Amino acid sequence: MVGSARPSRDVLASDEDRERVVERVRAAVADGRLSLDELDGRLTRVYDARTHGELRSAAHGLPELGSGDRPVAGRAPTSRFALGLFGAFGGRALFGAVVVKSPRQAR
């Protein structure tokens, strides 16, 4: 579902296509367009979708995402620094603090 040209309804959907629709569904919940009860059903339909037509059906009635609604990063962080900074490393949450002492406190 890239660009302005819409793929045929029968074209198989990719994982990336599904994730774009998931973003639309989550944005609709955040905007109050869908209830939390509707969220589960929509996400199930999105993840079960095999074609672009099924994805369009799952996203029916939802607005397209504007540029302000899209994530800043196009993918999840992969560096150890970024993973540690944002609290996930190897699928586990990290909790910790860095303690910095001034030279006077170190004495």
Image (spheres, rainbow, N blue to C red):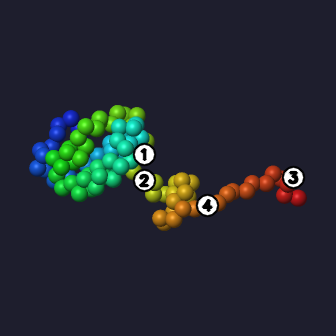
Q: Residues within 10 Å of mark 3 (few under 14, many from 20)?
A: few
Name the element at disc 3: loop
**Quick one: label 2 or label 4, which is nearer the N terminus?**
2
| Kind of residue indicated by mark 2 | Ala
Label 1 sits on residue: 73
Up/down of 35 relative to 99, above or below: above
Between marks 2 and 3, how big is the CA–CA gap?
A: 40 Å
- For residue 83, side relative to residue 44 (left or right): right
Q: Residue 17, image x and y in percent?
A: 26, 49
Q: Residues within 10 Å of mark 2 (few under 14, many from 20)?
A: few
Dot in front, 2 or 3: 2
Label 3 sits on residue: 104
Asked whether residue 105 is in view, the answer is yes
Q: Residue 94, image x and y in percent?
A: 57, 62
Name the element at disc 4: loop
Between marks 3 and 1, how big is the CA–CA gap?
A: 41 Å
Between marks 2 and 1, how big is the CA–CA gap?
A: 7 Å
Q: Residue 66, image x and y in percent?
A: 35, 33
Q: Residues within 10 Å of mark 1 (few under 14, many from 20)?
A: few
- Closest to the observer, 65 or 54: 54
Residue 76 numbered tag: 2
Dot in front, 2 or 4: 4
| Kind of residue indicated by mark 3 | Arg
Between marks 2 and 4, how big is the CA–CA gap?
A: 19 Å
| Kind of residue indicated by mark 1 | Ala
Between marks 1 and 4, how big is the CA–CA gap?
A: 23 Å
- For residue 53, side relative to residue 90 (left or right): left
- Which quadrant does the C terminus fall into? bottom right
Name the element at disc 2: loop
- Residue drawn at (42%, 45%) of the image: 73
